[in-house]
Image (tube, rainbow, N blue to C red):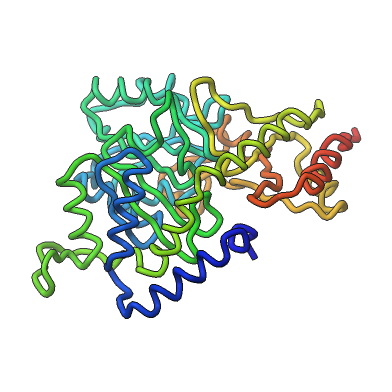
Amino acid sequence: MDRGFFQYQKEFEDKALEVLRSGWYVLGKEVSSFEQEFAAWCGSKYCVGVGNGLDALWMAFRVLGIGPGDEVLVQGNTYIASVMGITINGATPIFVEPDEYYQLDTAKLEALITPRTKAILVVHLYGHNAKMDDVIHLCRKYYLRLVEDCAQSHGSAFNGQKSGTFGDIGCFSFYPSKNLGAFGDGGAIITNNEQIAADFRVLRNYGSEKRYYNKIVGANSRLDELQAGLLRVKLSHLDELNEERRQLADRYSAQIQNKNILLLRERPDTHSVWHQYVIRCRSREALIQHLEERQIGTIIHYPIPPHLSEAYQYLGYGPGSFPITERYANEVLSIPMYNGMSEEEQERVIDALNSFEVIL
């Protein structure tokens, strides 16, 4: 059970009962209130709740009119859902290698822009931030759309501006493990464009503005009332939850000292929310075993880059196509970090990492 639940248990339970007793479970006041509150918290004009993060992504490109024959630049080391948001619409992902902060390498973008390029999808991976001033410059220069995948970056910022607010659309997931996690699936988009927000509201609800009057072939992708209500509770505590993660990350960064382990640093002028604390190790399998022997669990985010997945064989890439992406996939490891983590628990992880030795 998520310790975050117990931290605010009474608030969550009171809200759940309130929603259950209201008798209104789809597109009611909890969703509209959450949309207003989340938009304000992000610094955006509009928010539209949808069923999950993938729906937010594919619907974003649908609303922007991006489809067959169009290309979208996206970093190679992201979760595959980012790429699916592009290809579900028939558009082609053009992969970009990551930089030293594991984000989109903006220095490599311009060389990949062609007449078919219609958008850049920036993924703020692990709660960190891409170099957004470079991205904005290129979008303006080449008249490109900008979509941000903020599934892992609720509240992260570049030069004081929160992720999701730089481009046309910011896409969020509220999967339970996220910094702003629901108790099931959920998602949303934010935008400063009134027409985009209106189009999303139609698209998420069977293509209908008015019941039984369908303007387009739409989707059934609605953030439900119960999840919206519970998200409102968690949103009211999100700043303190994110700050706790930053403190945990600072402790790891200061105390993990092992020449066999490379730490991810925070880019200057950014504010990370540390969705994951990711390390790199060339002897990853040995490190995983070393930690397992000490009953410390880890996760690899992500072991198979999208360009090497079976789902995207048709794109024609093979091993060696994106060497930096592939090196990261072979070396990254997410170590335990969660709200409610005790000092003793973190000490155990630090001690285990510092005692790891590579046996040649």
Residue drawn where x is 48% and y is 66% of the image? 184
In this view, the residue in front, 159 or 257, is 159
The answer, for residue 128, to whether it is visible in the render is yes
Decide if residue 190 is on the left or right side of residue 209: right
Q: Position of residue 108 (x, y in %)?
A: 43, 22
Report which quarter residue 259 is drawn in.
Answer: top right
Q: Position of residue 35 (x, y in %)?
A: 31, 54
Residue 68 seen anywhere in this rendered image of the structure: no
In the image, what residue occupies the spot 78% across and 30% down?
255
- Quarter holding the C terminus is top right
| 155 versus 50 height, above or below | above
Residue plotted at (74% across, 34% down): 282
Q: Nearer the viewer, residue 125 or 161?
A: 161
Which one is nearer the viewer's eye here, 93 or 154?
Answer: 154
Q: Position of residue 258 (x, y in %)?
A: 82, 29
Image location (x, y in percent) of residue 206: 20, 68
* Between 186 and 16, the one nearer to me in the picture: 16
Answer left or right for 194 relative to 169.
left
331 on left or right of 116: right
Number of marks in picture:
0
Q: Residue at x 21, y 44 (%)?
A: 64
Where, by quadrant of the figure, is residue 353 drawn? top right
The N terminus appears in which quarter of the rendering? bottom right
Relative to residue 125, is residue 29 depicted above or below? below
Q: Look at the picture and state if 143 lies above or below 172.
A: above
